[in-house]
Image (tube, helix red, strand yellow):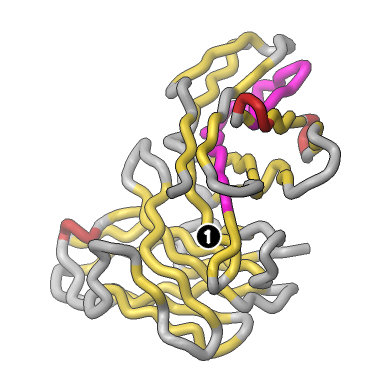
């Protein structure tokens, strides 16, 4: 149980393109979803927290207009990297939680984003 | 503010040997503690979690961890390591926020297993 699917797993696109990444909880309702960014050989950096039906809460230093997050249902959240540039290239990982305080986050397999 | 320290960036053990990965945390109240494992190019898999109760927690793949409040530690152990355990291991501390348990991760420990 507690499976999170993230799609696509790998995307390569030209600079200036907008890229959408989907995160789905397959067998549970995810009241809360989290988006992380991970640089090579580093830990996960939380970008934002999204609750179903409300605006995402962004961490300090994360541009909300650059990284658009939508959490329209209890099983789907999307991250759109708008007008992507090479410096946005990274590994993006989502996680989902039922939102209860003592429930763990379950992670997707990540999306490798490469901007040319 | 909550924080997690994983003192060992890299650890190498021989297959069949025992393993202990260290984790120290800082948190103002009773923490929720987690260990995750990440294989290259993949997401994180939950190994085990501690919320309350028995301080020795059993997880998947033969892993266990012990919560020691007096030492602010949550070390991960395995009695006999297998080659397939080679991966990156992350300790995390969480607490209830307005939107569920927000995690703070340590910097990770890269485990290498020698055959």
Residue B21 against residue A75 in the figure, above or below? above
Residue drawn where x is 41% and y is 73% of the image: A21
Give the quarter of the figure containing the C terminus of chain B. top right
Between B54 and A70, the one lying in front of the other is B54
Residue A21 against residue B18 in the figure, above or below? below
Between B69 and A52, the one lying in front of the other is B69
| Residue B57 horizontal side relative to residue A72, left or right | right
**Dot 1 surroundings within 10 Å: few (below 14), some, or many (20 or more)?**
many
Residue A78 in percent (x, y) is at 44, 78
Residue A15 against residue B12 in the figure, above or below? below
Residue A106 in percent (x, y) is at 63, 59
For mark 1, name the chain.
Answer: B
Between A81 and B53, the one lying in front of the other is B53
Q: Name the residue tied to disc 1.
A: B102
Residue drawn where x is 40% and y is 58% of the image: A46
Residue drawn where x is 17% and y is 57% of the image: A87
Residue drawn where x is 70% and y is 61% of the image: A103
For mark 1, give the secondary structure. strand
Residue A18 in percent (x, y) is at 25, 78
Residue A50 against residue A8 in the figure, above or below? below
Residue B44 in percent (x, y) is at 57, 49
Q: Main secondary structure of the magenta part?
A: strand
Extreme-right residue of the structure: B54
Residue B80 counted in the magenta span: yes
Magenta span: B74-94
| Residue A41 horizontal side relative to residue B31, left or right | left
| Residue B18 horizontal side relative to residue A18, left or right | right
Residue A60 counted in the magenta span: no
């Amino acid at each position: 149980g507690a499976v999170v699917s993230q799609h696509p797993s790998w995307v390569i696109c030209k600079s200036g393109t907008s890229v959408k990444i989907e995160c789905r909880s397959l067998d549970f309702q995810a009241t809360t979803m989290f988006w992380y960014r991970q640089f090579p050989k580093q830990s996960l950096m939380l970008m934002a927290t999204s609750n179903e039906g409300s605006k995402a809460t962004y961490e300090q230093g994360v541009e909300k207009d650059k990284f658009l997050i939508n959490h329209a249902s209890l099983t789907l959240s999307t991250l759109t990297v708008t007008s992507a540039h090479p410096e946005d290239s990274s590994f993006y990982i989502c996680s989902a939680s039922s939102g209860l305080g003592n429930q763990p986050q379950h992670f997707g397999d990540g999306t490798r984003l490469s901007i040319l | 503010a909550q924080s997690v320290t994983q003192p060992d960036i890299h650890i190498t053990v021989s297959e069949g040997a025992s393993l202990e990965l260290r984790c120290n945390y800082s948190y103002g109240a009773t923490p929720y503690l987690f260990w995750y494992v990440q294989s290259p190019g993949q997401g994180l898999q939950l190994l085990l979690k501690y919320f309350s109760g028995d301080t020795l927690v059993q997880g998947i793949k033969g892993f266990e961890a012990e919560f020691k409040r007096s030492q602010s530690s949550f070390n991960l152990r395995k009695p006999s390591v297998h080659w397939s355990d080679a991966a990156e291991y992350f300790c995390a501390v969480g607490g209830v926020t307005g939107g569920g348990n927000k995690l703070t991760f340590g910097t990770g420990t890269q485990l290498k297993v020698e055959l």
